[in-house]
């Protein structure tokens, strides 16, 4: 069975198309094809669209100002959250920066 991300915290991301990351702390999830097209076109495509399979790793290596939002600015993981659960079809993974 292929590992697939279903939720970040309590927010479903099972149908997300990918995410963009500024290379520091801003992570934005793209939920629709229109958002993907807008990111590639209207926004100038400044950031690569990354697969959802990389979002936990990206979150872990982001600077302490990290957050995850929808590209529409809806909050998925608020800034400075110390503990986040990533739920996969194969189980859960907890990122805990308090340890």
Image (tube, helix red, strand yellow):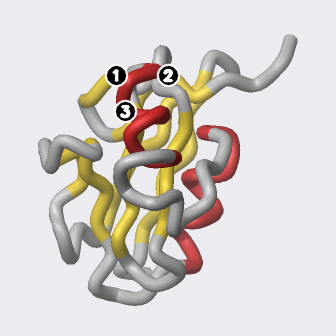
Q: Secondary structure at mark 3?
A: helix
Q: Is residue 1 above or below residue 94?
A: above
Label 3 or label 1, whichever lies nearer to me, is: 3
Residue at numbered disc 3: 35
Reading the chain from its start, which is encountered first: label 3 or label 1? 1
Tell me what residue is drawn at x 41 percent, y 77 percent: 97
Label 3 or label 2, whichever lies nearer to me, is: 3
Q: In which image quadrant can residue 96 be found?
A: bottom left
The tag on residue 6 is 2
Tell me what residue is drawn at x 35 percent, y 71 percent: 26
Find residue 28 and report its horizontal and vertical position in percent: 36, 53
Would residue 94 be seen by someone viewing this image from the given angle?
yes
Distance from disc 2 to disc 1, alpha carbons, whole Å, reads 6 Å
- Residue at the extreme top: 1
Distance from disc 3 to disc 2, alpha carbons, whole Å, reads 19 Å
Find residue 86 and report its horizontal and vertical position in percent: 48, 41
Q: Is residue 87 above or below residue 24?
A: above
Find residue 88 and report its horizontal and vertical position in percent: 59, 26
Instruction: Give the quadrant of the C terminus.
Output: bottom left
Residue at numbered disc 1: 12
Distance from disc 3 to disc 1, alpha carbons, whole Å, reads 17 Å
Q: Secondary structure at mark 2?
A: strand
Label 3 Cα neighbours within 10 Å, binned few <14 / some 14-19 / many ≥20 = some
């Amino acid at each position: 069975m292929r590992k697939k991300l279903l939720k970040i915290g309590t927010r479903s991301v099972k149908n997300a198309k990918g995410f963009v990351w500024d290379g520091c702390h801003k992570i934005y999830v793209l939920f629709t094809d229109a958002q993907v097209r807008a990111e590639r076109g209207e926004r100038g495509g400044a950031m690569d669209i990354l697969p959802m399979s990389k979002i936990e790793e990206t979150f872990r290596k982001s600077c302490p100002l990290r957050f995850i939002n929808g590209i529409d600015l809806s909050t998925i993981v608020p800034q400075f959250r110390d503990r986040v659960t990533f739920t996969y079809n194969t189980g859960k993974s907890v990122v805990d920066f308090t340890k």
